[in-house]
């Protein structure tokens, strides 16, 4: 509906640059540079729309769901005093890399980017597989620009999601099949 009403661009390159890229760059920057791992999904990622009804940017809300990567922050000499129970520490949390993967590969990729590309493909008459490959290549470019090696950041090439069951717990990760979509 947002695509049909003109709120989201109808060209894949513009969709990438105006909508998807800011979420990807924001996620990489927050997670890999500042140790703040956001929950990027449809409720927390918003479009910023100007008075002419054009999408001009994105915004992240509900920062209470952000996990604080205390190991990364410590390694970078950043403050680690956060009044949050949502922290991860490499030495003590068995789900350290799973949490990183879950936020990027499951939430951002699976809950936000992939459904957006499916809707875009239906409206624009573009092959969804080709759209996914295009965005995947752009995401890989953004990881290179960030200077962060995804394999090191995620602890390998495995990706994780929650099982399809009501109320999964924090460590109820399931290993995803195949390669991660957008890294």
Image (cartoon, rainbow, N blue to C red):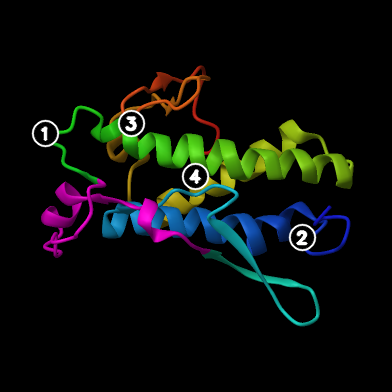
In the picture shown, does residue 12 fall above or below 49? above
* Figure check: 36 above or below 137: below
- Mark 4 vs 3, N-terminal side: 4
- Residue 93, image x, y percentages: 17, 33
In this view, the mark in front (4 or 1): 1
- Give the side of residue 13 with respect to residue 109, left or right: right
In contact (CB < 8 Å): disc 4 and disc 3 = no
Closer to viewer: mark 3 or mark 2: 3
Q: Residue at x 11, y 55 (%)?
A: 74
Is 81 left or right of 150, judged from the image as shown? left
Which quadrant of the structure image shows residue 122? top right
Q: Report if residue 183 is visible in the image.
A: no
Question: For the magenta stretch, what is the residue range?
Answer: 60-86
Structural distance between the alpha carbons of marks 4 and 1: 30 Å
Residue behind mark 3: 170
Counting labels gives 4
Q: Residue furthest front?
A: 166
Q: Check disc 4 and report the residue beneath it.
A: 140
Circles 4 and 2: CB atoms closer than 8 Å: no
Q: CA distance from mark 1 to mark 3?
A: 15 Å
Mark 4 secondary-structure assignment: helix
> Which of the 4 image quarters holds residue 48?
bottom right
Looking at the rendered structure, the secondary structure element under dot 1 is loop
């Amino acid at each position: 509906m947002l695509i049909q009403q003109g709120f989201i661009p109808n060209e894949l390159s513009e969709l990438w640059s105006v909508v998807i890229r800011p979420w990807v760059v924001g996620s990489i920057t927050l997670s890999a540079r500042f140790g703040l791992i956001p929950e990027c999904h449809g409720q927390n990622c918003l479009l910023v729309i100007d008075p002419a009804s054009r999408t001009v940017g994105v915004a992240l809300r509900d920062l209470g769901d952000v996990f604080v990567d205390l190991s990364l922050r410590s390694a970078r000499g950043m403050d680690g005093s956060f009044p949050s129970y949502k922290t991860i520490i490499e030495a003590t949390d068995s789900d350290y890399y799973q949490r990183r993967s879950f936020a990027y590969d499951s939430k951002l990729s699976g809950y936000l980017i992939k459904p957006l590309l499916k809707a875009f493909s239906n409206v624009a008459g573009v092959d969804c597989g080709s759209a996914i490959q295009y965005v995947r290549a752009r995401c890989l470019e953004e990881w290179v620009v960030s200077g962060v090696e995804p394999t090191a950041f995620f602890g390998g090439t495995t990706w994780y999601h929650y099982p399809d069951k009501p109320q999964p717990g924090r460590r109820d990760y399931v290993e995803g099949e195949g390669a991660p979509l957008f890294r």
